[in-house]
Image: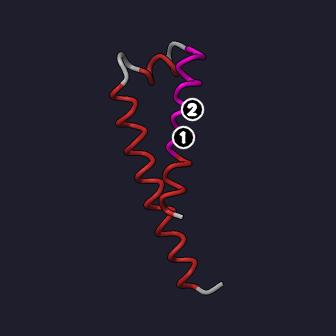
Amino acid sequence: MTISSILNDLVFVLIGVVMFSIALVAVGRAMPGNLWKQALDGQNLHAAILLAGIALALGWIIAAAVH
C-alpha cells in the first residue's frame, strides 16, 4: 500500500462521514417531534431502534455510493 492510496481512502472516509452526518440530521429533523430527545432523554426504545435503522440504511447507501 502506498501513501497516496491511504490518503485517498482517508479522503473517501471523511466524505462518507460528513455525508452520513448531514443525512442523519436531515432525517431526524424531518420526523415529527424531537426524535433525538425521545431516544435519549425519554429512553424510548422504539425511537432508538428507528434511529439505528436510519443510521444503518444511510451508512449502507453512502458506502455503496463511495465504493
Is residue 2 shown above or below 50?
A: below
Label number found at residue 1: none
- Residues at marks 1 and 2 touching, judged by CB atoms closer than 8 Å: yes
Label number found at residue 57: 1
**Residue visible at 53% across and 47% down in the picture:** 59
Q: Kindly give the residue lying farthest to the right in the view shown.
A: 1
Position of residue 45 measured from the top left corner of the image (x, y, whole percent): 60, 16
Report whether 45 appears left or right of 31: right
Position of residue 50 measured from the top left corner of the image (x, y, whole percent): 54, 25
Which kind of residue does numbered mark 1 sit on? Ala
Magenta range is: 43-58
To which residue does mark 2 refer? 53
**Residue visible at 57% across and 32% down in the picture:** 52
Residue 1 falls in image quadrant: bottom right
Which kind of residue does numbered mark 2 sit on? Gly
Q: CA–CA distance between discs 1 and 2?
A: 6 Å
Position of residue 34 measured from the top left corner of the image (x, y, whole percent): 38, 19
